Every structure is written in C-alpha cells, then in structure tokens.
Amino acid sequence: MTRRILVLRALGLGDLLAGIPALRALRRAHPDAEITLAAPAELGPVAEASFAVDRLLPASAPGRAVPAALDWTGPPPDLAVDLHGNGPPSHRLLAALRPARLYAFAHPETPGIDGPEWCAEEHERDRWCRLLTWYGHDADPADLRLPRPPGASPAPGTVVLHPGAGAPARCWPVARFAAVATALRERGHRVTVTGGPGEDDLVAQVADRAGLPHGDRLGGGPPFAVLSALVAGARAVVSGDTGLAHLAAAHATPSVTLFGPTPPSRWGPPDHPRHQVLWHAGAPGDPHARRPDPALLRITPDDVLTAFDRLPPADPVPPADPADPVTVTTGTP
C-alpha cells in the first residue's frame, strides 16, 4: 500500500516558496509516497511546479492562523509534517488525524512531540530544512529553484515593480515606487507594475504617477502561470518583502528587495550579487502592523536605484531541472 504523507503549510505564496527545499527533502526521502500538501487552493500551480507534491488539500484561515480543520478522509496519514509554525494549534490539528508519526518542532504544550528546538531568529528556509534534517532527512536550503515556465512572458525584459504586500507594514509608499518607475523609464527600461487580488487601485496609482501604458499594468492577481512567466523573463524585480521577491529567487531573476520591519536574515533571498537587499538595521517591528514600518520608510528611491545599478548584467540562467515531475491534483485525499 502506498504510504501517505500530509504536510501542513496553509500560508501564502512566499511561505510556500520558502518551504520548497523542505518539501523536496521529503520527496527524496519518500520517493514512492503520496505527498499531500494542505495549503490554499490557489497555490496548486506552485505546488505542482515544485515537483515535490502529488496532491493539494485546500486549507486556509484568515490572518495566517491555523485552519480549524482539515478535510482529510480515509486512514490516518503514515506521516504528518508541520511546516506551518511552532504550534501548539498546528501540532494539535495534525495530531487529531492520528498519524503514525508526526514531524514538528518541540513545544512545552505538546510534550508528546519529540522534535528540535524552535529558533525565532532563524531564516525561514533554514528552519524547515533543519526540522527535516533532525528527523534524518537530507535537506538543502538552496534547493529552491523552479523550472522556467512553458508560457511566454507578457513583457519580456521588463523591470517588474510590485508595490503591494500582505500588510501595510511592508508596503513602501506609492510615490516612491512611482519615482523609481519614472527614473527607470528615463534610463530606457520597460517597467511593469503588478498587484495581487484587491490591489488594482494600488497598481493604478503607481502606474498613473509614472505614466505607464495600460499594457504594463498587471493587477487583480494574475494567474500564477502568467506571473511566473513574467518574473522568469524579467530584467529584475523590485518589491518589498513579499511573495514576488521569493518568486524572483526561485527563478534566479535579479531583484532588489526592500526590507522592514522583518530583516533579510529571516526572509531574504540567497546571498548572490543578483539579489540586492535594502535594510536599515534595528529592532524588528510588527510585520502585520497597519502602517509602513519606520525602517522601511528610511529607504529612499535613490537607495533603490543605486541597488539596481549593482545588479549584474542580464545573462541567461540555466533553468532548474527537477528529476521527477509530478502532476498535482486538488481535493480530498
């Protein structure tokens, strides 16, 4: 009988991309198992692109909370893996399914779990790979590349500006994004502004101030296939600490990422000249606050343009080539 593995990571795009190295470690350790990922339904294409997941079980909750329940049917999982957080709510959610084994970080309120200690200062990719390593699996935090999308970019060679983020704390001001867009266009670069669901007005504000044509505005949360092709074929991505920055890292696309209130030591891209990070060191703030973080506001348009100038010339990057592609299905196991 095929072993069934359930992984909980019911978070956003950037979270899933940061978890791909750990997911691939599971796939290598259990090549013949059926791996189900509990995550938001809209992340199905991302899970498929990871070549590490067989099935997506739709699961989400507001505000990055733990889902109230999982629509898991049939026998208990042979293995459940908590890539969602430190618990105890996520531990208890998975334990309620009575898996034969549960991988998770140790927590005093779930003493039955024998896992490694949680480290709040750890980088997100390193954290989950360390969890898998503690349980005996070979995990590489650098194993984050996605294959180049099959579709063509809607704007090849463009500089992608993404002004939105999951919370106002991580949103750099519209006027500053527009100033960067204007300066880049004056240098001869094509600029495209993107936005997620509900960010059409934000995209329009930046684009209108910079005088961008309507063809260079991609709001409304474009499908992942379109967004992935756009980023993979871009000259660079300029954004805050959000999912698009992680997608740029996954495609080895040059990027300039503006950090605050969370430092790049926790969520930053790989250490490589193609990825420039801007961060004014200080005490980390609240990443879910309702106002832009003071550290983020210390970054100026000139800082961004200087970082952009440090990016290496655009060179072809060999596409990632995961060995065993799989097709992800969505639904109840």
Image: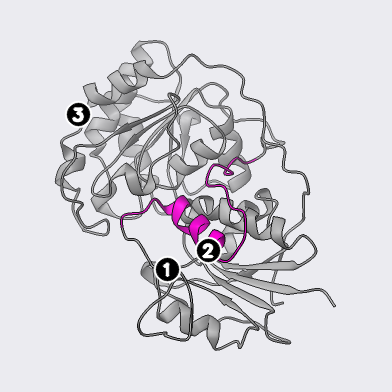
Do the numbered discs 3 and 1 sit on residues whose CB atoms are within 8 Å? no
- Expressed as whole percent of the image width and height from the top left, the position of residue 161 reads 40, 33
| Residue in front for this viewpoint, 72 or 26 | 26
Residue at position x 62%, y 54% in the image = 138
Residue at label 1? Answer: 85
Q: Is residue 118 left or right of residue 332?
A: left
| Residue in front for this viewpoint, 158 or 332 | 332
- Expressed as whole percent of the image width and height from the top left, the position of residue 241 reads 35, 44
Whether 140 is among the magenta residues is yes
| Residue in front for this viewpoint, 81 or 311 | 81
- View extreme (right): residue: 1
- Expressed as whole percent of the image width and height from the top left, the position of residue 175 reads 22, 33
Residue 134, which numbered label? Answer: 2
Residue at position x 52%, y 47% in the image = 141
Q: Disc 2 residue type?
A: Trp
Gap in angstroms between the C-alphas marked 2 and 3 = 42 Å
Q: Is residue 53 visible?
A: no
Q: Is residue 54 visible?
A: yes
| Residue in front for this viewpoint, 11 or 263 | 263
User: Mark 2 packing: few (<14 Cα in 10 Å), some, or many (20+)?
Assistant: some
Give the residues in magenta.
121-146
Q: Secondary structure at mark 1?
A: loop
Residue 327, which numbered label? Answer: none
Whether 321 is among the magenta residues is no
